[in-house]
Image (cartoon, rainbow, N blue to C red):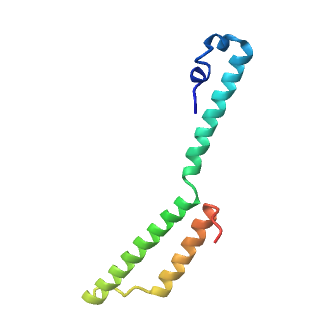
């Protein structure tokens, strides 16, 4: 976006007019609001879904490694995958509700 000085570079004295000053002030407020809106929209649902998928992927890898170690060393109980899947479903439902994502 152009700044007011760029807009009025051919006629800078017009910026001293009270109506133009008010218009410039409103223009700057709208520009600030637009920048704020753009920053907010950057963290869109797509980004929330990417975060969700990354967390799910990490969780699955962690559980598979934990089960592999339990099987190999026999020191801990094996992973109850039914319980893990139920927890995952509950986590996804909560996450989607919190971020207003409707699947």
| Residue 76 or residue 50, whichever sits in front | 50
* Residue that extends furthest to the right in the rendered view of this protein: 19
x, y (%) of residue 40?
A: 58, 47
Instruction: Judge whether 32 appears above or below 4 on screen.
Output: below
What percent of the width, then of the height, locates residue 65? 33, 80
* Quarter of the N terminus within the rendering: top right
Please give the count of numbered marks on the rendered protein.
Answer: 0
- Which of the 4 quarters of the picture holds residue 38? top right
The spot of residue 97 in percent (x, y) is 63, 65
Left or right: 95 as drawn, with respect to 63: right
Q: Residue at x 55, y 61 (%)?
A: 46
The quarter of the picture where residue 81 lies is bottom left
Residue positioned 62% across, 19% down in the render: 8
Query: Which sits in the foreground, 1 or 39?
Result: 1
Check the picture and name the quadrant holding the C terminus: bottom right
User: What residue occupies the far front of the structure in this picture?
Assistant: 10
Quadrant of the rendered image containing residue 27: top right
Q: What is the x, y in percent for residue 55?
A: 45, 68
Depicted 76 relative to depicted 15: above or below: below
Q: Is residue 51 left or right of residue 96?
A: left
Q: Residue at x 39, y 79 (%)?
A: 63
């Amino acid at each position: 976006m152009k700044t007011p000085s760029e807009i009025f570079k051919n006629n800078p004295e017009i910026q001293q007019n009270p109506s133009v000053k008010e218009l410039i002030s409103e223009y700057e407020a709208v520009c600030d609001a637009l920048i704020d809106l753009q920053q907010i929209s950057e963290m869109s649902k797509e980004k929330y879904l990417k975060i969700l998928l990354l967390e799910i992927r990490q969780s699955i890898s962690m559980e598979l490694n934990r089960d592999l170690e339990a099987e190999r060393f026999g020191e801990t109980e094996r992973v109850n995958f039914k319980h893990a899947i139920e927890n995952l479903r509950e986590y996804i439902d909560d996450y989607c509700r919190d971020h207003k994502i409707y699947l």
